[in-house]
């Protein structure tokens, strides 16, 4: 098991390295000059030279990659192009530090609500497979799979914020607010995100449990007269845990795209919102830094899923 | 839904879902056909021009301006939903075609030739798939800017990686069968084996995949347009229409809900059809076994 874990860790490191190369290369190798991209087609040659100097574009790409990677690891993420004024440089790390807490809080709360709820719903659906309850859950999840996040958000805003005035339409926070003062502004984004990730988690949990229920040893248990709930909880669940952990981590990783949309809908002051803004003004250093943070979270979640499924898999606990 | 999502196919055959399911699939087909006709004949159906200003007011009520009301600039929403169908569904169709052409070709090639070709292709696809796809799209758009070409090629490339996985796995299964061995022994070339031996046997599973990928393309384009990074104004597109009219919610206008609902009807219909198709083909197989 230990070798498996070590191998999986090495794999994650390699993946992260590949991601960093691609994130760096995407802005290098692709046609188009970063300096022109920043200044626009009409920039004077002098202005272009100045910005190339400032970004160090005259030096070879591999050298800049190593510097960039070194900066990334030590937390020096460079200088934001769009947020800097002449003489006053805005550090990317400061911009991100202001925003990252809210994004983590949003995603964390959505995970806290959606994970137990969808595992429960998935279990119920699997236990009652084929019944009316199961079909209702299946229909509802298919519905929510087909609907974009902003549609869910728009309906929630329409009913809960505009008609009933329970929650603010736009999430804005002031500094120095306590957690409980932030709650009203957090509710709608968290609910939207929860709905958008729950469908997959529920469906995949159901599929994982049904898969285990189809195996011969469950049939054996049924034949020798073990009770239904005992079969599900004691016989099936331990073996379904690994796929369920996988499902959870996978869907938390999917949440990254959900976060991007949800933060935009509610104008939520988080990191995804910062990144989308940076993309539209082509603030390359900021985009690269945000992309690396999101990708690291993604790789980390996938890694956690694999490690957990190694740990809970009874067959892998003892070395052969 | 999240746009990274992959719908796990229901493998179990439960016979409980019978005629009701088929009726639902027929309704879904009708809805889909309706939107396809709307997209094809958009200029004939739309009552006004796509950028025509009909009123000075934002979010005019339904009836005052057009059948569905006006948008934030006073343009007819019905007209823009019709043109949006053309843009969104048209782009999604182009993306799906490119994605499948590239994905299937590379996937079959990797499976049939094996060895170093397979390793190189599979590892490069793995590298691309290590990204959440929205991040990949954001990085490319940040460095290339927004244009329809960039939009189509980026999403098609992301689709191709998913299609590659599926078609490689299919071709691996088919490739070990006797008739492929025979073709190889006859001395047929790679292209012939891919086209005449493997492709005809992979069409079933690939057809279901087309539905899933087409839905994904629609949701991806509209998500990017919703972020303001996809289709640019004044072109109408369902995602950007939601974005433009979002503040209408404050005035109780349904303007942003209409294009969002249009997306939902299309994607829901396709998901239903895919479910029905998989269910049907599973049942066919189990019937064969029973006989």
Image: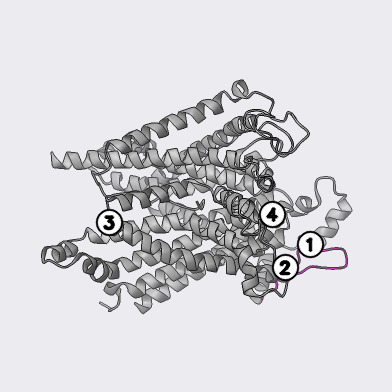
- Tag 2 or tag 4, which sits nearer the N-term? 2
| Secondary element type, mark 4 | helix
Foreground tag (4 vs 2):
2
Q: How many labels sit on residues?
A: 4
- Residues at marks 2 and 1 touching, judged by CB atoms closer than 8 Å: yes
Disc 2 to disc 1, C-alpha distance: 9 Å
x and y percent of residue A225 in the render?
12, 66
Disc 4 to disc 3, C-alpha distance: 47 Å
Image quadrant containing the N terminus of chain A:
bottom left
- The question of residue A86 being in magenta is answered with yes
Hey, which residue is sitting farthest left in the picture? A224
- The question of residue A229 being in magenta is answered with no
Indicate left or right for B118 with A183 as reference: left
| Callout 4: chain | A
- Tag 4 or tag 1, which sits nearer the N-term? 1
> Going 28% across and 35% down the picture, which residue do you hit?
B19
Q: Nearer the viewer, residue B270 or B248?
A: B248
Looking at the rendering, the stretch of residues picked out in magenta corresponds to A75-93
- Tag 3 or tag 4, which sits nearer the N-term? 3
């Amino acid at each position: 098991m230990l070798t498996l874990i070590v191998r999986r860790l090495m794999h994650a490191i390699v993946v992260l390295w590949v991601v960093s190369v691609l994130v760096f290369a995407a802005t290098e190798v692709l046609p188009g000059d970063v300096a022109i991209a920043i200044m626009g087609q009409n920039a004077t040659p002098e202005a272009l030279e100045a910005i190339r100097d400032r970004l160090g574009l005259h030096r070879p790409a591999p050298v800049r990659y190593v510097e960039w990677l070194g900066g990334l690891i030590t937390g020096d993420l460079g200088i934001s192009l769009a947020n800097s004024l002449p003489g006053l440089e805005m550090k990317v790390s400061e911009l991100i530090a202001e925003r990252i807490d809210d994004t983590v809080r949003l995603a964390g709360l959505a995970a806290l609500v959606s994970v137990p709820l969808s595992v429960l719903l998935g279990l119920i659906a699997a236990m009652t497979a084929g019944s009316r309850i199961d079909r209702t859950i299946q229909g509802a999840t298919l519905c929510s799979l087909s609907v974009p996040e902003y549609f869910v958000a728009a309906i929630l805003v329409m009913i809960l914020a505009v008609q009933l005035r329970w929650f603010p339409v736009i999430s804005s926070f002031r500094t120095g607010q306590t957690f409980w003062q932030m709650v009203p502004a957090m509710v709608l984004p968290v609910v939207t995100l929860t709905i958008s990730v729950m469908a997959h988690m529920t469906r995949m949990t159901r599929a994982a449990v049904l898969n285990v229920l189809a195996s011969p040893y469950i049939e054996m248990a049924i034949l020798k007269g073990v009770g239904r709930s005992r079969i599900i909880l004691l016989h099936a669940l331990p073996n379904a845990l690994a796929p369920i952990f996988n499902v959870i981590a996978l869907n938390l990783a999917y949440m990254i795209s959900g976060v991007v949309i949800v933060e935009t809908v509610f104008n939520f002051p988080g990191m995804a919102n910062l990144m989308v803004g940076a993309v539209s003004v082509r603030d390359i250093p900021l985009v690269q830094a945000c992309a690396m943070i999101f990708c690291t979270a993604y790789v980390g979640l996938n890694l956690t899923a694999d490690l957990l499924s190694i740990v809970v898999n009874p067959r892998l606990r003892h070395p052969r | 839904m999240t746009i990274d999502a992959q719908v796990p196919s229901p493998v179990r055959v439960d016979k409980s879902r019978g005629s009701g399911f088929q009726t639902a699939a027929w309704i879904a087909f009708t809805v889909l056909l309706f939107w396809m006709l709307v997209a094809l004949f958009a200029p004939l159906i739309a009552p006004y021009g796509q950028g025509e200003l009909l009123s000075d007011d934002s979010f005019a009520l339904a009836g005052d301006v057009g059948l569905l009301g006006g948008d934030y600039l006073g343009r007819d929403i019905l007209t823009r939903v019709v043109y949006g169908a053309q843009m969104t569904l048209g782009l999604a169709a182009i993306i799906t075609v490119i994605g499948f052409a590239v994905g299937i070709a590379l996937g079959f090639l990797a499976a049939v030739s094996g060895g170093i070709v397979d390793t190189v292709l599979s590892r490069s696809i793995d590298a691309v798939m290590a990204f959440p796809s929205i991040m990949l799209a954001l990085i490319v758009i940040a460095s290339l800017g927004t244009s329809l070409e960039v939009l189509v090629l980026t999403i098609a490339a992301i689709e191709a990686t998913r299609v590659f996985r599926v078609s490689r796995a299919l071709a691996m299964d088919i490739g070990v069968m006797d008739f492929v061995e025979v073709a190889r022994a006859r001395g047929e070339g790679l292209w012939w084996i891919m086209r005449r031996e493997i492709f005809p046997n992979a069409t079933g599973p690939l057809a279901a995949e087309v539905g899933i990928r087409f839905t994904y393309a629609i949701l991806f384009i509209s998500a990017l347009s919703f972020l303001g990074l996809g289709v640019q104004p004044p072109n109408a597109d369902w995602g950007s229409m939601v974005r433009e009219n979002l503040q209408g919610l404050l005035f109780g206008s349904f303007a942003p809900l209409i294009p969002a609902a249009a997306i939902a009807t299309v994607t829901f219909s396709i998901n239903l059809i895919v479910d029905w198709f998989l269910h049907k083909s599973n049942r066919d197989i189990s019937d064969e076994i029973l006989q």
